[in-house]
Amino acid sequence: MFCPKCGANLKDGSRFCSKCGSSIGGQGGRPGYPPQMAASSMPPKKKKGNTGLIVFLIILLVLVIAGVGMGILYYMNEKKEAELLESVRAEFQEGNEDDEEDEDRRRKKDEEDDDEDEEREGDRDREEEGLSTTAAATEAEALATEAATTAAQAMTTAAATTAAPMTNEPVTVSLQYSAQTSFSGLIRAGVVKATAVDSSHVVQRGTTIDNSAWSAFDGQATTSWQEGAAGHGIGEYVGISFDREYQVQVVTFRLGNHRSDSWYVKNDVPKVLSINLGGQVFSVTFPREMVEFAVVLSRPVAASSIRVTVDDVYYGTEYEDATIAEIGVYGR
């Protein structure tokens, strides 16, 4: 076999010339040789298909995309739920704050209402304590005239019939706290309401408060005799007759207005009192204390009435009415 181009001797079946490299085929061979089939005329080999791998990759990609999508949806749902929960908490907190603010407003309003009630109560009390001096003096003068006659008669009778123990020793008095005084063997003298007498007293119109002489002997510390004269009550007096003659040993006093601590400081409080028992007069100076005092006599004094006169006072912060809440007489 020879190369048709260069004539080189070739091995049988060679497709290319080993000398010139030309392709051996077609009609280019020597005469008599069958024509060689060109390399280009051979059918191409079929490549192995990759369809299965491609399908697998596509499925995997779809699964990955689906997983990512579901993750995104889950994250978005969680975020929305968190935002909703935060919104609910914020509304709840705002509601609590609003409730607290409403409660504070109600509390402040209640406090303001209480303050207004106290102010109105104070105004009413001041109106009750207020004195129309001229009108009070006129009414007190009429009452005093009537009661003074009865009291004077009783005191005159008592002076004539008193039989005090025979002794030349003068009667002296000592001031004690009532809580530290012995009342053993003594009884409280009975008093006759109709004989209660005073030189003047405060008249509070439009109220049931009684500041007359009887309020100093009614057994109630919250009521009181309040003199109604102009000034601080120096020389004003209050008195009453007993239901019989007693051998008086102790006289107790609650001086000032004992209705409350605040009223105690508002009114004048007697400082020096003259105590007339059976015609004997004793002068006693008291400290300013909201307690019950006891004036103890060194020996019993026979008496069927008592009269107490204001000689000096401790000034009040608002009113000039000398006030005595209670007088008690104890004897046998």
Image (cartoon, rainbow, N blue to C red):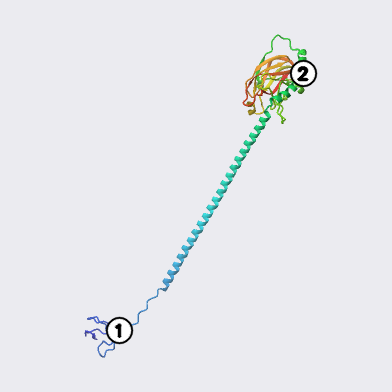
Residue shown at 65% from the left, 34% from the top: 120
Residue 330: % across, % down: 72, 19
Q: Quadrant of residue 200?
A: top right
Q: Nearer the viewer, residue 198 or 32?
A: 198
Between the C-alphas of marks 1 and 2, the distance is: 172 Å
Asked whether, in this view, residue 225 is left or right of residue 24, the answer is right
Amino acid type shown at disc 1: Ala
Residue 89: % across, % down: 54, 51
**Can residue 69 be seen from the camera position used here?**
yes
Amino acid type shown at disc 2: Thr
Q: Nearer the viewer, residue 72 or 63?
A: 72
* Quarter in which the N terminus is drawn: bottom left
Q: Nearer the viewer, residue 197 or 133?
A: 133
Q: Is residue 67 above or below residue 297?
A: below
Number of the label disc, if any, that sits on residue 38: 1
Check disc 2: other Cα within 10 Å, few if <14, some if 14-19, many if 20+. Answer: few
Residue at the far front in the pictured view: 134
Check disc 1: other Cα within 10 Å, few if <14, some if 14-19, many if 20+. Answer: few
Number of the label disc, if any, that sits on residue 149: 2
Residue shown at 77% from the left, 12% from the top: 160
